[in-house]
Image (cartoon, rainbow, N blue to C red):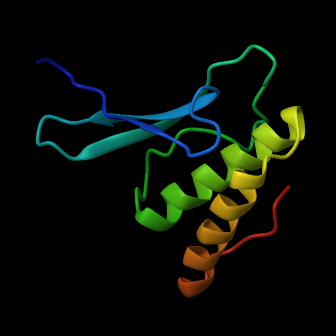
Amino acid sequence: MRKPVPIARIEGIEGAARIECEVDTSGNIARIIPFFESDEITPSKQLGAITDHITPVNTAKLVRLMIHEYLSHRGGEEVLDDVLEEIDSFLMKHKQIDAPS
């Protein structure tokens, strides 16, 4: 396989959003890219690819932003509240939580 692209789905919005990872030749993640699979969702400029400092904390922040973006366009779903709680708990442990936009 050449240039495999690992894809992650977010619980609660599996059919609407995904995260793709570009892997470099040494097998390390070189870039994490958020995608919305619906034309109804136009991501804000705040939501972009991670190319530097690819860490679990930055990845969790990206997932959090994606969920907030989804909620601002489509409204709430109960499972997303649980996912956001888990992400916020993780970020609080790492003292890296920011206020949502």
The image shows residue 43 at horizontal and vertical percentages of 75, 31
- Percent position (x, y) of residue 80? 71, 53
Is 29 situated left or right of 2 in this image?
A: right
Q: Quadrant of residue 48?
A: top right
With 48 as the anchor, is 69 left or right in this view?
right
The location of residue 16, given as percent across then percent down, is: 64, 27
Q: Which residue lies furthest to the top in this view?
A: 39
Residue at 74 percent across and 44 percent down: it is 46
Q: Which residue is drawn at 86% across and 55% down?
A: 101
Q: Residue at x 13, y 34 (%)?
A: 25
Placement of 44 over or under 42, stated as above or below: below
Q: Residue 41 or 50: which is nearer the viewer?
A: 41
Which of the image's four quarters has the N terminus? top left
Q: Percent x, y for residue 73?
A: 87, 33
Q: How many labels does the image show?
A: 0
The furthest residue to the front: 78
Answer above or below: position of 37 versus 88: above
